[in-house]
Image (cartoon, helix red, strand yellow):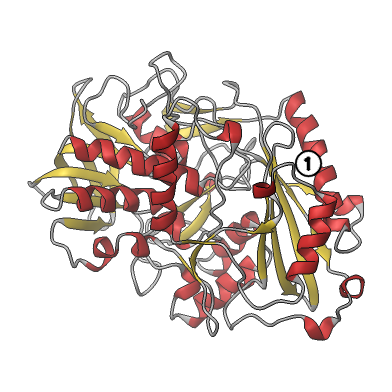
């Protein structure tokens, strides 16, 4: 491993894959190396689990995702895919506490341990941010262009999953119950990353769809090396010279050299690696943010729409959902976003009425790193401090009212069926290495994703997102990754 690469990327998930692709497309001669610690989870590296050939794994994913609750997917994936523990040979999604961290105040938090990261597990919802969710310090024209690029890379589709006579009646009922002052923000189809098919599941976008040559080795200048865990970033305080990596199979430690480096581990492990490496800006791990998650299911009353159980469509084998819908936020007036998933579950025709609402960005919500205690991989132990402010609780209460209004428009939804999920359950954590326009102690990276004070160290992923989101974080993080890739390319 004595080669010197033009760009070394840590993490093979969606954001690492986007940067690898964008830099390669702009600089085909640049030598790019992507490092991944986790092992293969499917027969085709980087493919989404809904498309795998392994029947047992596909069935497990389908069963778990029918619940439309990511926290349940994590719990089930841990048990049904990999057993009840974690080690370096494990693969899948695991509660962060399994690694030895204290996430008692953020108990839903989980991490992936596999090639492709969370990009092989996600529901593929790609709604876009609105109003104050968009960073106001970025040129709007650049943001809009990067958003379109990110949508294209993720293959965002807006439309039906199957032909469904319930769709239009549901649209009409919920549009009346939860009206929008902006016609472009009315209740409608959820943007989904992937390609629809009539005879098989919606083909959700995985990292291999973003950068195929990263996973099939068809482009010699873009390499993926797996089973390597990065333990330290070597630097002199302003320039990174290499990454210290441990081969998880042999225990051998080596150094990988490069000219530019991008860390795209995730919103938890990226700041952990920086801390372990003595890179500790004031904002590192501070202002951790996550929208609150309010969950529930309502059985659809077919009769009120002039329909019956015979009209319920059957999705293709392996497809968990009949329909995927979106109730967009409308800014400060209603900082709440609905993700409503229609499905047949336990013999019932159900609409999952999940809502996310923005929470305040506060320095009290943070990750604390220990120099004395370590996790299962020998990295600094993390303790997450997280709570909801009084303002957060008021917004949560208002959002529950919105959720109930939407649910009661299609069926009977008792108040007690609305549930606030544990913090961390959305898996949409942001702000731990947030972007900012000035090195004022409130951000970790500049508007190009470059760590303040460093000339060749960049970060990407949802942790870079500086705003409080109502929408799922993936497309917002991907949009910033497109921007960051452009900045990296300019210096190669």
- At which x and y percent is residue 36? 31, 53
Q: Residue furthest top?
A: 440
Q: Nearer the viewer, residue 189 or 221?
A: 189
Position of 431 with respect to 222 (left or right) is: right
Q: Residue at horizontal 60%, vertical 45%?
A: 471
Residue 306 visible in the snapshot = yes
The image shows residue 16 at horizontal and vertical percentages of 33, 49
In the picture shown, does residue 324 fall above or below 102? below
Q: Which residue is mark 1?
A: 399
Residue name at image x 25 percent, y 24 percent: 454
User: Disc 1 on helix, strand or loop?
Assistant: helix
Residue 154, horizontal then vertical, whole percent: 43, 58
Q: x%, y% of residue 445?
A: 37, 27
Q: Can see residue 243?
A: no
Give above or below for 481 relative to 309.
above
Residue at 67% x, 73% y: name it: 322
Rendered-image quadrant of the C terminus = top left
Q: Is residue 119 above or below residue 5?
A: below
Instruction: Locate residue 440: give its quadrant.
Output: top left
Q: Is residue 78 above or below residue 57?
A: above
């Amino acid at each position: 491993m004595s080669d010197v690469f033009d760009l070394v990327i840590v993490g093979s998930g969606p954001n690492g894959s986007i940067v690898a692709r964008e830099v390669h497309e702009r600089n085909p001669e640049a030598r790019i190396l992507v490092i991944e610690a986790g092992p293969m989870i499917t027969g085709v590296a980087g493919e989404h689990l809904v498309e795998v050939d392994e029947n047992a794994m596909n069935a497990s994913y389908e069963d778990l995702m029918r619940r439309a609750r990511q926290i349940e997917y994590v719990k089930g994936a841990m048990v049904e895919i990999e057993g009840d523990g974690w080690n370096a040979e494990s693969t899948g999604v695991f509660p962060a506490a399994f690694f030895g961290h204290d996430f008692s105040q953020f108990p839903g938090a989980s991490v992936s341990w596999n090639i492709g990261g969370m990009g092989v597990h996600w529901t593929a919802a790609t709604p876009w941010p609105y109003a104050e969710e968009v960073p106001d310090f970025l040129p709007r024209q650049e943001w809009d262009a990067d958003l379109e690029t990110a949508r294209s890379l993720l293959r965002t589709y807006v439309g039906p999953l199957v032909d469904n006579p319930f769709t239009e009646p549901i649209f009409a009922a919920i549009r009346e119950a939860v009206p929008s002052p902006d016609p472009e923000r009315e209740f409608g189809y959820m943007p989904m990353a992937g390609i629809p098919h009539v005879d098989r599941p919606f083909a959700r976008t995985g990292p291999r769809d973003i950068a195929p040559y990263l996973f099939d080795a068809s482009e010699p200048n873009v390499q993926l090396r797996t089973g390597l865990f990065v333990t330290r970033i070597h630097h002199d305080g302003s320039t990174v010279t290499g990454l210290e990596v441990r081969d998880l199979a042999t225990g051998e430690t080596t150094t990988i050299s490069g000219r530019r480096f991008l860390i795209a581990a995730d919103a938890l492990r990226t700041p952990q690696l920086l801390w372990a490496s003595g890179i500790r800006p004031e904002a590192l791990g501070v202002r951790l943010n996550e929208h609150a998650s309010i969950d529930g299911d309502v059985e659809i009353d077919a009769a009120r729409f002039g329909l019956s159980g015979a009209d319920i469509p059957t999705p293709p084998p392996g497809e968990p959902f009949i329909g995927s819908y979106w109730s967009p936020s409308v800014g400060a007036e209603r900082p709440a976003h609905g993700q409503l998933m229609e499905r047949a579950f336990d013999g019932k025709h159900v609409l999952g009425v999940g809502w996310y609402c923005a929470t305040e960005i506060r320095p009290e919500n943070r990750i604390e790193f220990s120099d004395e205690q370590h996790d299962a991989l020998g990295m600094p132990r993390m303790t997450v401090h997280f709570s909801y402010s009084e303002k957060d609780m008021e917004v949560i209460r208002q959002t529950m009212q919105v959720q109930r209004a939407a649910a009661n428009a299609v069926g009977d939804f008792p108040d007690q069926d609305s549930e606030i999920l544990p913090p961390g359950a959305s898996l949409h954590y942001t702000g731990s290495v947030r972007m900012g326009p000035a090195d004022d102690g409130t951000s970790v990276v500049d508007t190009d994703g470059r760590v303040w004070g460093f000339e060749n160290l960049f970060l990407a992923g949802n942790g870079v997102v500086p705003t409080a989101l109502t929408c799922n974080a993936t497309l917002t993080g991907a949009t910033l990754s497109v921007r960051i890739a452009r900045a990296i390319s300019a210096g190669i």
